Image (cartoon, grey):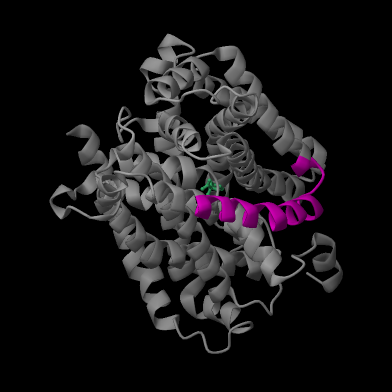
Amino acid sequence: MDTKDIQERGSWGSKIAFILAASGSAIGLGNIWRFPMMVGKNGGAVFVFVYILAVILIGFTVMLAELIIGRHAQKNPVGAIEHIKPRSPWKFIGYLGILTGVCILSYYSVVAGWAVGYLVKTASGVFSGEVTSQLTERIFTEFSSNPFEVLLFFLIIIVITTFIISKGVKGGIERWTKVLMPLLFILIFFLAIRALALPGSSKGLSFYLKPDFSKLNGTIILFALGQAFFSLSLGMGTMITYGSYLPKSDNLVSSAGWVCFADTLIAILAGIIIFPTLFAIPGIAPTAGSGLVFKVFPLIFSQIPGGFIFGSLFFLLLSVAALTSTISLLEVPVAYFVDERNWSRKKAAWMIGFLSFVLGVPSALSSGGVKFFTKIDFQNAMDFIFGNVSLAFGALLICFFLGYIWGVRKAVQEVLSGNPRFKLKPLWAFSIKFLTPVAIIIILIFIKTIFSG
Ligand code: PHE
């Protein structure tokens, strides 16, 4: 590829622009909706403990691997692997990533639509009177089982996502994330302090942060690892694609480190808001599942002066955080059809956007909208298959490809151009070749026993 091509593909405006865009992809419903739900359903603090270990030992390893592959090849996931290992079946990793992206986008956008719906509700004063846990429970059930409302907000998310991607990511996304992500951060921080000050918050805090290791089991490890991949946007080539816009002078190690850190911090803070509130105002079980944050956040706003403003602002920022993730989910398949199949960006975006909508309808109707989909819990099943298993499997293949097919030595060269010392090299090499693949394989084998037993 000559320099002209590189210029035409474009690149991030600065290191901070990349970190914000990649964090924008990573930070989203995964942190604020999925993480607390997983913690609640999987034993509390012990899950948090395994999760943090998984981010440091495994998530960081895979994040760096994806950035290396992307920056080296300067291409979408399928093109990148073709570039490194031409005409080999390893391209399958890229195709799997595309399929996974479309499937995650389909149910993820449904929940993003809930966030928009809650923005409208909060701003129109639904939570302005006396708010009890029974009330938030009832409002969520009524809302999520109303097919018309849910499908409408879901459609709005898909249309906005598709529109932005059809115009190209750069200008829009870079500009938005730079302002809105820091704002989300400040608001979350503030709400965490408020939640901690609630009388009776300590019980929630100890559920959240004091691990009871006797609860540790294979299911918890499986979900913690899956959550790490999901939350960091790993295992489907998002970071290959985002890394492909990085300049050679960038220090990939510190970039990966910053994204992992920011993402984990937001998830931990989201839990610090949810669990103390949950235990201080009883009525909702931590195991409430996908409605958890929608039932708990309105409760905390009702306890704050100006809760109406903060509540509206929170759901607005949550919708935006979700949007910076849906955009990255759609960008992977679109980049493929544009680069490799010569489709126009517009055509690719609208075709795949439409497909994701159709695919998402059963998920939208599985929280009470249609009995059959509710009974088989379609949305949860999609999340398990694509948000857990498929990402873990994709990450495993990426480790194999980098560690054994391309070779760690060549990959390390790619890091050195922006980080001549690369002090973590021996640790990272060990993790990519042995630790991470072994951990994922054990977990994938576990799935079978967990679900047959
Ligand atoms: N990481 C995003 C979140 O936490 C979701 C996501 C997963 C985005 C995989 C891209 C790829 O909300």
Residue farthest front in this picture: 305
- 280 in relation to 431, above or below: above
Of residue 404 and residue 236, the one placed in the foreground of this image is 236
Is residue 376 at least partly visible in the picture? yes
> Taking 285 as reference, is 364 above or below it?
above
Query: Is residue 170 in the magenta section?
Result: yes
Find the magenta span and give its range. Answer: 164-190
Left or right: where 50 falls relative to 390: left
Q: Which picture quadrant has residue 330?
A: top right
Q: Position of residue 114 (x, y in %)?
A: 56, 28
Most foreground residue, 104 or 408: 104
Q: Residue at x 80, y 43 (%)?
A: 345
Magenta span: predominant SS is: helix
Q: Is 115 in front, or is 219?
A: 115
Count of marks, rendered view: 0
Quadrant containing the N terminus is: bottom right
Residue 271 visible in the displayed image: no
Residue 200: in magenta span: no
The relative height of residue 223 versus residue 133 in the rendered view (above or below) is below
* Left-right relation of 38 to 308: left
Tell which of 186 and 391 is nearer to you.
186
Residue lying furthest top: 371
Picture coordinates of residue 171 (x, y %)?
81, 54
Q: Quadrant of the C terminus?
A: top left
Q: What's the residue at 41%, 54% (across, down)?
A: 268
For this view, does 191 lie left or right of residue 376? Answer: right
* Residue drawn where x is 44% and y is 70% of the image: 403
Residue 396 at x, y = what percent? 41, 56
